[in-house]
Structure formats: structure tokens, C-alpha cells
Image: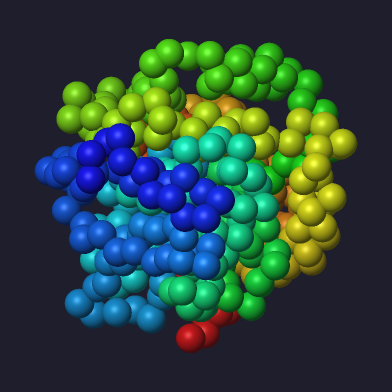
């Protein structure tokens, strides 16, 4: 396929990034895997790295915007070395997964449906540890609320679950700036966003890897649409469903750890919106990942992996296999 090819699937025009774009990405030797979602019309990519000596634990790694599973390239190897199976999905519109030509085809409900179908139905994952970041939490936490029986524990990293009821206060100018820039910037380079929100400087090959899924503007519809799906008002169309998810989350006693970084200008290291409301988080001491920005996987991937592994081991008796 060339970068201008599209696949017509009933009401969807699907763009599939040429595989050559993903050749020789630095520190990303993982074999690709795919499942079909939405009645087989969309191809969703995932990594599935398995240890030689399994611990019996499966870690589901969820990325946010505008990253993809490449974000976890330094987190996966130490977790696999520790004995844990790692499954990292690319959300539809990101990474090696299919993209939609019509940006309005991306909705919150559809994103959640695609993720649920891939993880719960196609892969049939159970007894998972979820590691979620950014939009990975905004989708992963409602998935948890809908199917708590599938999860053993959660590690939330620089993420949250807004309903639109929150007082944005001092955070509004930053959100407004992001909403504007995500729609108006030309060219829009995902690598520039990741690089701006890390402490360490990414090298040219790493920057190119973050841009690899998007040969041109047509492939960026999902990246551009995600910011517009953030609920910023109690009148948002998704607010009722998100409130319902919180009604469940506020009853969950499964181990829930917040691993936020000290230099994330989005959360500013404040995880109270999660740790103060979810019962399984209240009894825990939540670590701070030092020397890391919003994309803490880039700045401190091994440290984050160590937090996840320690948490799995510390709570394994609470969540027997």
C-alpha cells in the first residue's frame, strides 16, 4: 500500500500506515500482532511480549495522545524479565492500528468499544494489571468500571478520569491552549508534543518513530480529534456515562496505585482525584517518579517498570492467580 491508499469498509474510510514506516525503529524490536474490531472492519495492533519463565501476571499497557505503544519500549523489557506478560495496544487512530479518514467517526463511545472488544473479546485477557497513562486512563478506567472482574490491580501514571463536572480553575488556560494548538498547528508533529513534555531530549530517530504512524495530515484525524473529546462541561454528551463509571470506581477495593511524576505540568504530581476517591488506593503509599515529565515512560521507563513489578509482588497475595 502507498500512503494515499484507503480501505472502504461500509460507512468507514480506513487508512492503513505502510509497514515500511515502522522499519528499524530504535529500541522497538517487538513483533506486531493484530485483531479485527467493529465487525472486522478495523485492524487494531498490539504487542504481546511473553517471558521465558512466566509469573502468571499479565500487564495491559495503555497509551494516550499523541503517543502509541512505542512509548512503552523501555518499560516492557524489564517487566518481561521479571516474568510478566506485557500486552500493549495501539488505540484506533494511533501507531500501527488503522486510522479513520473522517475525524468525526472518532467518538468516546467508539474508542471505548474498540478497546473493550480488543482486550476482553478478541484477546480474552483476564486477571490483568492495567498500567494506564494519559488518555489510556480516560478509556481504561471506564473499562475497569464496566468489567472489574477482569482486573487484579491498576497502576495509574499521569492520568485521570474527568466527567466535565470539575472546576478547571487554574488549569483552564493550559487546556484552552492545548485545544487551540491541537486544531490549528500545521504541520502537527506528535513527536514535538512528546519531546516538549519530557525532561530528557529525544534524539532524531526517536522523534521520527513517534511520527512514523502518520505519513501525512490525513492520518492525523484521531490525534486531532482526541482533545475535542475531553469533557469540559457538565453538559458534555459523555458526562452521564463517565459519572456512571465513577459510581463503580468509588466502590472498588482492588489495589490501585498512582505513580505520577514530579515534573508533569499537566497533573503537577497531584493524584488526589484518583487516590482520594477509589477505595483500593486510599490505604496505599503512592510513589513519585522523580526526574520525569508527563511522558514519564521516556524519562524513567525502568523506574516505572520497577514500580509496577514491586506493586504486583506486594499485592500478589491479595489477588491470587
In the rendering, at what x and y percent does residue 128 appear? 50, 71
Q: Residue furthest left?
A: 24
How many numbered marks appear?
Answer: 0
Image quadrant in which the N terminus is located: top left
Coloring applied to the structure: rainbow
The image quarter in which residue 270 lies? top right
Question: In the drawing, does residue 222 fall left or right of residue 268?
Answer: left
Picture coordinates of residue 164 (x, y %)? 79, 37
- Which residue is the extreme one toward the bottom? 321
Q: Residue at x 18, y 30 (%)?
A: 205
**Residue displayed at 41% across by 58% down:** 44
Q: Position of residue 106 (x, y in %)?
A: 58, 43
Q: Residue at x 31, y 41 (%)?
A: 5
Tell me the quarter of the picture where residue 249 sits: bottom right
Q: Is residue 59 above or below residue 149?
A: above
**Percent position of residue 162, x then y:** 72, 41
Could you say which is closer to the camera, residue 285 or residue 71? 71
* Residue ID at (64%, 64%): 144
- The answer to which of 132 and 104 lies nearer the viewer is 104
**Observer able to see residue 141:** no
Q: Is residue 42 left or right of residue 155?
A: left
Q: Is residue 138 left or right of residue 155?
A: right
Q: Is residue 238 visible?
A: yes
Amino acid at each position: 500500500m502507498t500512503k494515499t491508499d484507503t480501505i472502504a469498509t461500509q460507512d468507514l474510510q480506513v487508512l492503513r500506515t505502510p509497514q515500511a514506516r515502522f522499519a528499524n525503529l530504535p529500541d522497538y524490536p517487538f513483533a506486531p500482532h493484530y485483531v479485527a474490531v467493529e465487525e472486522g472492519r478495523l485492524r487494531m495492533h498490539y504487542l504481546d511480549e511473553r517471558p521465558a519463565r512466566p509469573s502468571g501476571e499479565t500487564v495491559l499497557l495503555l497509551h494516550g495522545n499523541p503517543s502509541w505503544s512505542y512509548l512503552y519500549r523501555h518499560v516492557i523489557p524489564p517487566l518481561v524479565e521479571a516474568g510478566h506478560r506485557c500486552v500493549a495496544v495501539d488505540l484506533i487512530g494511533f501507531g500501527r492500528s488503522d486510522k479513520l479518514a473522517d475525524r468525526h467517526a472518532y467518538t468516546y463511545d467508539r474508542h471505548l468499544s474498540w478497546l473493550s472488544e480488543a482486550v476482553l473479546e478478541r484477546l480474552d485477557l483476564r486477571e490483568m494489571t492495567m498500567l494506564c497513562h494519559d488518555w489510556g486512563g480516560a478509556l481504561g478506567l471506564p473499562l475497569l468500571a464496566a468489567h472489574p472482574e477482569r482486573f487484579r490491580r491498576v497502576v495509574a501514571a499521569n492520568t485521570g478520569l474527568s466527567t466535565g463536572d470539575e472546576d478547571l480553575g487554574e488549569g483552564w488556560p493550559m487546556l484552552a491552549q492545548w485545544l487551540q494548538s491541537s486544531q490549528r498547528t500545521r504541520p502537527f508533529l506528535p513527536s514535538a508534543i512528546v519531546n516538549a513534555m519530557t525532561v530528557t531530549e529525544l534524539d532524531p530517530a526517536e522523534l521520527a518513530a513517534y511520527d512514523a504512524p502518520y505519513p501525512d495530515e490525513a492520518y492525523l484525524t484521531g490525534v486531532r480529534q482526541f482533545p475535542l473529546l475531553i469533557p469540559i462541561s457538565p453538559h458534555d454528551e459523555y458526562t452521564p456515562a463517565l459519572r456512571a463509571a465513577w459510581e463503580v470506581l468509588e466502590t472498588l477495593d482492588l489495589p490501585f496505585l498512582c505513580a505520577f511524576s514530579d515534573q508533569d505540568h499537566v497533573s503537577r504530581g497531584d493524584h488526589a482525584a484518583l487516590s482520594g476517591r477509589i477505595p483500593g488506593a486510599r490505604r496505599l503509599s503512592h510513589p513519585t517518579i522523580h526526574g520525569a515529565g508527563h511522558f514519564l515512560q521516556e524519562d524513567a521507563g525502568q523506574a516505572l517498570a520497577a514500580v509496577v513489578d514491586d506493586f504486583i509482588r506486594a499485592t500478589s497475595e491479595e489477588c491470587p492467580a
